[in-house]
Image (spheres, rainbow, N blue to C red):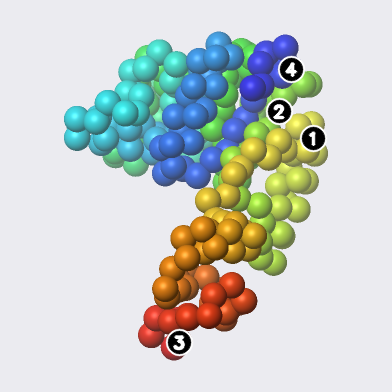
Amino acid sequence: MIARARAPGLVAVNFPARDLARLKTFHRIAQKTSRKLVLSFKHAYLLEQFSALGGGEYPSIDDPQLCFYADRKGWGLAGRDDYPQNIVEQDYYTWERKYLHRDNTINFKDIRENQEQYLFYCNYFQLNELVDVMPKPGSRYVRSVCEPFSDEMLFDERRVRNWLELLGLGEAYQIHASGHANYPELRKMVEDIKPKKLIPIHTEHPELFKLIHDNIEYPSLTQA
């Protein structure tokens, strides 16, 4: 997908934090491109909980292709070697502290020095971390999240573009595939299934289904 030959620097990625299916996809990409996928402590906790349930579907926190990122928070002591461990820990919630000292936990200095080795999970709230990482020329930002569909999201989109331009990352690569069917797909589905009755749910315009079926029943919640 995005091999080192095409991205000689860092590859920062964004996908829904709790979407483990996309986490698995980027984990496979990391394997195929000989990079390590750098995730957050929240991801570490989530993977650990699934592992405790006995599910082997997702990578474990000890997977050699995974690292976990100690972001700069509180006093910003991540990556500082001139403070005692107990002082650094005060920047983090109690549940996070056990992840701070893992062998596969890294910080901005590690990524800055070896950018071509990482796929770095970096959502919109973590773009400021890239100021410390200082992406090299040729670095890329890959998004696997939905496109903006509201005024607020359009405003956020402009802000993200400004960040990416400031950081020298250029336009983001958009690889999101929506899980919502469009109108032609819905119409084709109705034509193929030929239901006796159609009940629209999870839609902003249930009245439009009258265009593709004669027998529409609206749930009481939709009518309200």
Mark 1 = which residue?
Answer: 170
Label count reads 4
- Left or right, 86 with respect to 195, comes to left
Amino acid type shown at disc 4: Arg
Q: Disc 3 or disc 2, which is closer to the eye?
A: 3
Mark 4 = which residue?
Answer: 6
Name the image quarter holding residue 177: top right
Q: Disc 1 or disc 4, which is closer to the eye?
A: 4
Image spot of residue 92 (x, y percent): 38, 38
Q: Is mark 1 in CB contact (under 8 Å) with mark 2?
A: yes
Amino acid type shown at disc 2: Arg
Residue 100 appears in the picture as rendered: yes
Question: In the displayed structure, would residue 189 be above or below residue 45?
Answer: below
Residue at the image point whose x is 66% and y is 56% from the top: 148
Residue at the image point whose x is 58% and y is 49% from the top: 178
Q: Is mark 2 in CB contact (under 8 Å) with mark 4?
A: yes
Between marks 3 and 4, how big is the CA–CA gap? 52 Å
Residue found farthest to the left: 53
Name the image quarter holding residue 20: top left
Q: Residues within 10 Å of mark 4 (few under 14, many from 20)?
A: few
**Mark 3 or 4 closer to N-term?**
4
Between marks 1 and 2, how big is the CA–CA gap? 8 Å
- Left or right, 52 with respect to 119, comes to left
Residue at the image point whose x is 44% and y is 29% from the top: 24
Between marks 2 and 4, how big is the CA–CA gap? 9 Å
Q: Disc 2 or disc 4, which is closer to the eye?
A: 4
Mark 3 = which residue?
Answer: 223
Mark 2 = which residue?
Answer: 140
**Mark 3 or 2 closer to N-term?**
2
Q: Is mark 3 in CB contact (under 8 Å) with mark 4?
A: no
Residue at the image point whose x is 46% and y is 60% from the top: 193
Image spot of residue 70 (x, y percent): 46, 29
